[in-house]
Amino acid sequence: MILLPPRNFLALPEQWSGLQRSRVVVLPVPYERTTSFGKGTASGPEAIIEASGQVELYDEELDSEIYTATGGIATLEPIDPGGSDAAVESIRRHVDGLIGQDKTVVCIGGEHTIAIGSARAHSDRYPDLSVLQLDAHSDLREEYGGNRYSHACVMARVYEFSKDIVQVGIRSQCREEADFIRQHKIATFYAGDLKDGRYGPDRYAWHDAVIRSLRRNVYLTIDCDFFDPGLMPAVGTPEPGGFGWYETVSFLRRLAAQRKIVGLDITELSPIPGLIHPQFVMAKLIYKLIGYIFQKGAMNYAPALNTLE
């Protein structure tokens, strides 16, 4: 079942939010089982979708009403996938069915665990795939609190079916995770290195370093704590030293111009009563990303990366 306006993403009218015509599908997954500090990620999808009704449909950067380039954006009823490994399989089946209908799927969580099922569905469907993680934390623990499907173990589970993982923005991890990264040669771009100019003084230098490490197809998973807490305070595990709006969207714009983003998820928003800007930021980010994916011609400003490494 699809959600109708005003309960759907962007509050789009029915002619622009039907499932058959829309090339993009928003799948809310209010899953929360393993949050370990701040709680509330189960309320994240509804908050983002509600806030999206206030996002301007015209995007001045792309000079377009983005939803028209996709034939519309459909929003499905939230799913309750159950718990732990059963949840991962349920999400995988839902996402796989949508990919089979030639849809670009945007999963909105919920805790980061939802990314395992969605990434698995895309890994099964798309050859030559990298999983790109924007996050403050490595999420590479083998288990946390006795649970292998904890939000702290997401990328360890992803690594079991996709060895091509690239991490960006990491600034908090345990010794076990640091050892795992070294042992398995995970491409991890630490926030401090990116901000200190390790990859070159040019503003695009770290963009290029990350993109060169990716294969042709990219599944993108974004934990909201990738952003600095000043911009994104509504997370359960905030970390200082995160990323701002423009440095993030400039990277994503360049990424979409040079690689094919085949699917994505946004997770770990924990709404704060009375504070509305975090969910609005995420709603606008999703709309921007859809625009970048479907309107590559608007991004020809960026020098091409001609090699795939």
Image (cartoon, rainbow, N blue to C red):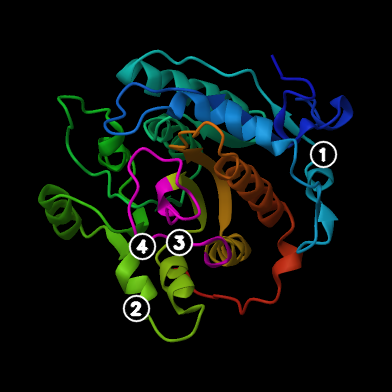
The amino acid type of the residue labelled 2 equals Asp
* Quadrant for the C terminus in the image: bottom left
Q: Mark 2 highlights which residue?
A: 196
Disc nearer the start of the sequence (1/2): 1
Does dot 1 land on a helix, a strand or a loop?
loop
The amino acid type of the residue labelled 3 equals Phe
Q: Mark 4 highlights which residue?
A: 241
Distance CA(mark 1)–CA(mark 3) = 32 Å
Q: Label 4 neighbourhood size at 10 Å, few (<14), some (14-19), many (20+)?
A: some
Q: Mark 3 highlights which residue?
A: 243
Distance CA(mark 2)–CA(mark 4) = 12 Å
Query: In the rendering, which numbered label is found on residue 212?
Result: none
Distance CA(mark 3)–CA(mark 2) = 13 Å
Question: Residue 252 lies in what quarter of the image?
Answer: bottom right
Distance CA(mark 4)–CA(mark 1) = 38 Å
Does dot 4 land on a helix, a strand or a loop?
loop
Q: Label 3 neighbourhood size at 10 Å, few (<14), some (14-19), many (20+)?
A: many
Looking at the image, the residue that sits furthest to the right is 15
Do the CB atoms of the residues marked 3 and 2 lie less than 8 Å apart?
Answer: no
Q: Mark 1 highlights which residue?
A: 71
Q: Is residue 66 left or right of residue 139?
A: right
Residue 79 location, x and y as percent?
54, 17
Do the CB atoms of the residues marked 2 and 4 lie less than 8 Å apart?
Answer: no
The answer to whether residue 132 is above or below residue 198 is above
Do the CB atoms of the residues marked 1 and 2 lie less than 8 Å apart?
Answer: no
* Quadrant for the N terminus in the image: top right
Q: Is residue 32 magenta?
A: no
Disc nearer the start of the sequence (4/1): 1
Residues 126 and 177: in front is: 177
Does dot 2 land on a helix, a strand or a loop?
loop
